[in-house]
Image (tube, rainbow, N blue to C red):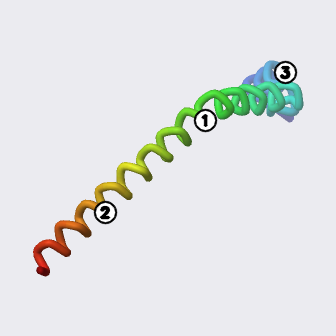
Amino acid sequence: MKTFIERNTCRRLGDHTGFTLIEIMVVIIIIGILASIVGPKMFGNVEKAKLNAASAQIEMLGTALDSLR
């Protein structure tokens, strides 16, 4: 026999607790929207960083060749 607390907990929460399909779909859609907004901004900065790194490496190579002479 269930105690008073167990009966109230089961009645309040229901016998099945968890997320519904609609709730999960809403969260996935929100994450997708955020990724579509943030993603392009981050990848644009990556390209700029690659160009800066390549120019710094070319400059260091030139300095190393000058010191070798």
Image position of 66 (left or right of 19): left
What residue sits right under mark 1 in the picture?
Answer: 40
Image position of 56 (left or right of 34): left
Give the residue at x 44% y 43%: 48
Q: Amino acid at mark 2?
A: Ile
Q: Is residue 58 above or below residue 26?
A: below
What residue sits right under mark 3 in the picture?
Answer: 11
Q: Nearer the viewer, mark 2 or mark 3?
A: 2
- Nearer-the-camera pick, 32 or 51: 51
Q: Amino acid at mark 1?
A: Pro
- Nearer-the-camera pick, 28 or 8: 28
Q: Amino acid at mark 3?
A: Arg
* Numbered label attached to residue 58: 2
Image position of 3 (left or right of 51): right
Label 2 – label 1 distance at C-alpha: 28 Å
Earlier-in-chain disc, 2 versus 1:
1
Label 3 – label 1 distance at C-alpha: 47 Å
Q: Quadrant of the N terminus?
A: top right
Extreme residue in the front direction: 69
Q: Is residue 68 above or below residue 39?
A: below
Label 1 residue SS:
helix
Mark 2 closeness class: few <14, some 14–19, many ≥20 residues within 10 Å: few
